[in-house]
Amino acid sequence: MSQRKVVIVGAGPGGLASAMQLAAGGCDVTILERRNQVGGRTSAIEIDGYRFDCGPTFFLYPRVLDEIFHSTGHDLMEEVPMERLDPQYRLTFGGGGQLDCTPDMDEMDRQIAKISPEDVGQLKRYMDDNRVKLEKFRPILESPFNSPMDLLKPSLLGAAAHVHPMRTLGKELQRYFKDPRLVIAFAFQSKYLGMSPFNCPSLFSILSFLEYEYGVFHPIGGCSRVSERMAEIAQDMGVKIRLDESVESIEMEGRRVRALHTGRDRYDADAFVVNADFAHWMTRTIPNSVRRRWSDENIAKKKFSCSTYMLYLGVEGLYEDQPHHGIHISKDYDRNLREIEIDHVLSQDPSVYVQNAGVTDPSLAPSGHSTLYVLAPVTHETENVDWSKEAPRFRETTLDKLEQVGFDGLRDRIRVEHQITPDDWQSDYAIYKGATFNLAHNLGQMLHRRPRNRFEELDGVYLVGGGTHPGSGLPVIYESSRISSRLLLQDLGMDTQFIEQSAQGVPPRIPASAPLPEPAIA
């Protein structure tokens, strides 16, 4: 029998991880990428010798991707050298106080004692509770949800005691910490999902736990290097990557997708994997008449994450007194969150994240220079904000904030600058509403209520990425690729044992039908 053909739309982290697994499973895989480089939001921005990550800069919970690498006969840490950071990041609070966050629990208690003596010991209790919680929830995060009946799975019922659907993440952290700054310190990670901790479900208390339990890593060369290496490995496994190939239309037979058309060619396949931004791709590519549950009208009613305002600065010199990662919390954090998610206006006092990676990785800039990656969470696209007018003012607000938190003389040291606004996320990166973290992760948009890994409205189509189950964030995006690859191979009657074994920590048996290497990117 000839090899089964799979076409993947998008060379983001989910698409690349899927390509590796499907090629290892014996499929003939082609990736169509609309941009001129791989990685999507995990691509690199390179300007005059400076290299920046476009999107994610924290590499968390490497277990998932390491298992995927092992399932294809590779070792993640050998392929992409990484450094575990300690301190993981510095948190400064506009209302006063600072934490150099470290996995050393005794050191954390010493720092917590300076902020709130009565909260000493509570972090260890939080860690113990969430260690159990993650173990209970792992089967849920690693399994597909195809219908409401999946809610009756034994794994979900076993985790039910740890679910408090009416409790937000913020409320959950208030069970441990009395000082509101410490609540924020262990709840701000909801921003990885593009949500306020006071709207985010309490389930996601595991996010902060993952950082302290498993570490915050910096891949040498940046998180974009992970995507680039995955593309190189995929090509060595026979995957064909077609850059500058945007899907313009589809060819269908009833509910089944038979082929995709780009400006260059027609691509038929036995199955298709969509790694593009879900809402944008569906509303721009699939006729609205074909979709019922996920029609344009229904998608428009969904809740979407916040967006981000980005500055990428190549600077002369190195800020050696600043940490690799710095998170600077607005003085009135509640107001800042409300302005982003409810009022949909720009803050005068935004919270700001800065990556000062030169203190760890000098390869990212010319000798004697360094890179600063600056992110401010902002509202997604809205008629309230005209970025063509607001971007210059918000740039000044952001640079003022950086100088206030210790980046002295920054404006005079900038040698290279690049900016991305929500307008750019929408137009250049094809992200619906510029919502960089995709569909919001409220209880009405999780599990079977999220677009499903085996997409329910089109036969032969599978989803990976933040727009499907389990959700946004690199570890769960990689997990979505494992879920969808397993479903796809099973539906084609192919072996998935190598995926199952790796997920259980067993050395994988790569199917003998894995294809031979093909030429490099075309």
Image (cartoon, grey):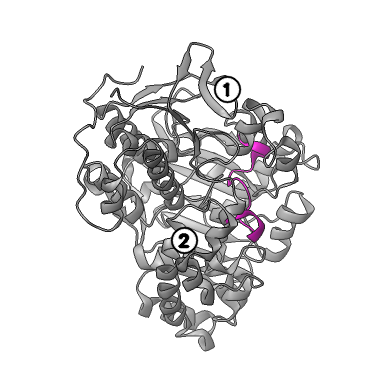
Q: Give how far apart the Cα atoms at labels 1 and 2 are.
A: 33 Å
Q: Give the range drawn in magenta.
A: 431-446
Task: Work out whether residue 256 or residue 40 is closer to the camera in this orientation and state it.
Answer: 256
Pair 1/2: label in front: 1
- Quarter of the image where the C terminus is located: top left
Task: Work out whether residue 370 or residue 29 is closer to the camera in this orientation and state it.
Answer: 29
Query: Can residue 102 be seen at all in this image of the molecule?
Result: yes
- Is 441 covered by the magenta stretch? yes
Given contact means CB atoms under 8 Å apart, are the residues at marks 1 and 2 in contact? no
Secondary structure category for the residue under label 1: strand
Q: Relative to 209, is 51 above or below? A: above
Q: Find residue 140 and name its label.
A: 2
Task: Say left or right for 301 vs 90.
Answer: right
Are there few (<14), some (14-19), or many (20+) residues within 10 Å of tag 1?
some
Residue occupying the far bottom of the picture: 118
Q: Which residue is located at x 53 percent, y 73 percent?
A: 160
Amino acid, disc 2: Ile
Q: Quadrant of residue 253?
A: top right
